[in-house]
Image: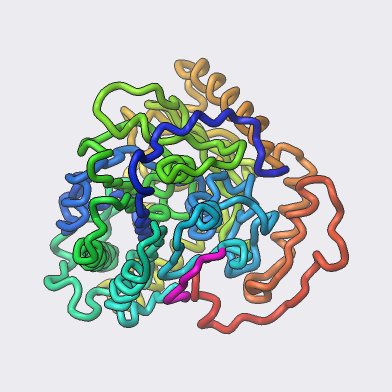
Amino acid sequence: MMFTVGVTVATPAGISDISPPNILLIVSEDNGPELGCYGDPYAKTPRLDNLAGEGIRFERAFVPQAGCSQSRASFLTGLYPHQHGQIGLATWGFRLYRADTPNLPRSLKSAGYRTGIIGKLHINPESAFPFHFHEIKSANFARNTLSDYARHADTFIRAGNEPFFLSVNYPDAHDPWLRQIDGLPVNPQAADDIKAMSYIGLDPPGMREMVADYYNCLSRLDALVGDLLDVLDRCGKADNTIVVYLGDHGADMLPGKRTCYEGGLRIPMLMRWPGKIVPQVRKELVSTIDLMPTLLAAAGVKPPSGLPGSELQPLFKPGEASWRTRYFAEYHTHAAAPNYFPQRSVRTERYKLIENLLPGEIHPDYDLTLSKLSKEAAKRKVSGGLNLTQAIAQAGSTVKHAYERMRQPPRFELYDLVEDPYEFHDLSGSTEHVAILHELQAALRAWREETNDPLLDPGNLERLSAEVRSIKSKDVGKDYRWGYPDYFFGREPAATDVPLKKRRKSKSSTQSED
């Protein structure tokens, strides 16, 4: 079926020789590796830094698509978005191709694990993920009663002696970037305390307040994760619990969320397993699609066939390990037409290739994101406001040309991530890089064929473009039925596949979960 891609899965290497380990999966929203343990000079994250010191800090960890639903569906199924079908937000009706797609909670539940989730799932259909326990089902971007996350975790962890899988999903650092909630962080940072992330390439005064509050969100997240880890300690189960912390994708900046640039795809990922993981930093290219085979192997559960990821167990101890030399990612859309711009990408230790499937067209999310950030500055009454279009126009030629390319990309973009870690210089037209360009083009094509990418078919790309562009985001909701899950794989949509429900979304629901 769609999720079988013919990739050989290694024999499980991490099966525990004692009782199966508990698994605590901690997920934050909309943040890259802006943590102290990743060397960020402005991050105040002592609890996550301590967690990193007790386990593995994956220096180069990535998601397969920089969007909330798409990323979450991938680490829970072990598949790329074009394989599982959740190519856009669940809030706008995008969904898995099949409700019976194998996933992490279902596999662990069948093996005798108690399964729980706190915070949003954000994947359609939710029934495909049969957790025993689910609290705080909303995204909670208002940050209501944040102490409830640890309180519900305490209840779940103490509820039985069976091994457990618990996923805790926090709202920070998603916008709105709120400075302080429930006294957290204790000492908020201000605009004069920080600078914008280097990959943005811009640092106008009007952005500083927003970026400062982004860092304040991460400080608050850090405190809440600390409370959760304290619960695990008090329950006496920390020694036999695998703790994984990760971000679901990069920050909602440009170039970040909703892009194939490093600012969107690169995330923090930490893993602790006392007695099994030697504390260290690993620099291999790892992906969140590696989590499902890793955690199932640790639990002694046979993984589904055809998972494209790899078990991380060879990286649990210091020393060289045979590992992938290429990492693949993609993008489709987020809500609908305002974000639609399908892409594919591949990176090696040094180089990154992005293929834009609609070359020469204007990326609709570009102006949308600039406008969104400027409106946020206006709402905050930032002194002098924020005109990012003007800031880009006044930037140096390198940064200005990078933003122009982001707005209207060519077919291919090639970057040297050693010399140009923030992807400002496109080398796709360089005669000195023709060989690496052709090598990565061939590798990307081979990966797309191996994983049965439906957009290799020009008819599917044309039809998806027409379908997405025919829909206004305000007119679709979670119950909307898209046709792509059927025509991607050769079957015409049945009558029940056209919109079952079409409701106008209120202003509040439009921003509820993204």
Residue 316 image point, x, y percent: 30, 34
Q: Say which quadrant the N terminus sits in.
A: top right
Q: Which residue is drawn at 31% across and 69% down?
A: 158
Look at the picture and state if 101 lies above or below 157: above
Q: Nearer the viewer, residue 253 or 363?
A: 253
Name the side, left or right, on which 301 lies relative to 490: left
Predominant secondary structure, magenta span: loop
Q: Residue at x 70, y 60 (%)?
A: 468
Look at the picture and state if 140 lies above or below 321: below
Q: Does the magenta stretch include residue 237?
A: no
Residue 313: name its quadrant: top left
Report if residue 367 is visible in the image. Answer: yes
Look at the picture and state if 120 lies above or below 243: below
Q: Nearer the viewer, residue 14 or 344?
A: 14
**Which contiguous range is marked in magenta?**
130-137
Residue 509 image point, x, y percent: 54, 80
Q: Which residue is drawn at 32% across and 48% down?
A: 268
Residue 111 image point, x, y percent: 51, 52
Q: Which of 227 and 12 is in front in this view?
A: 12
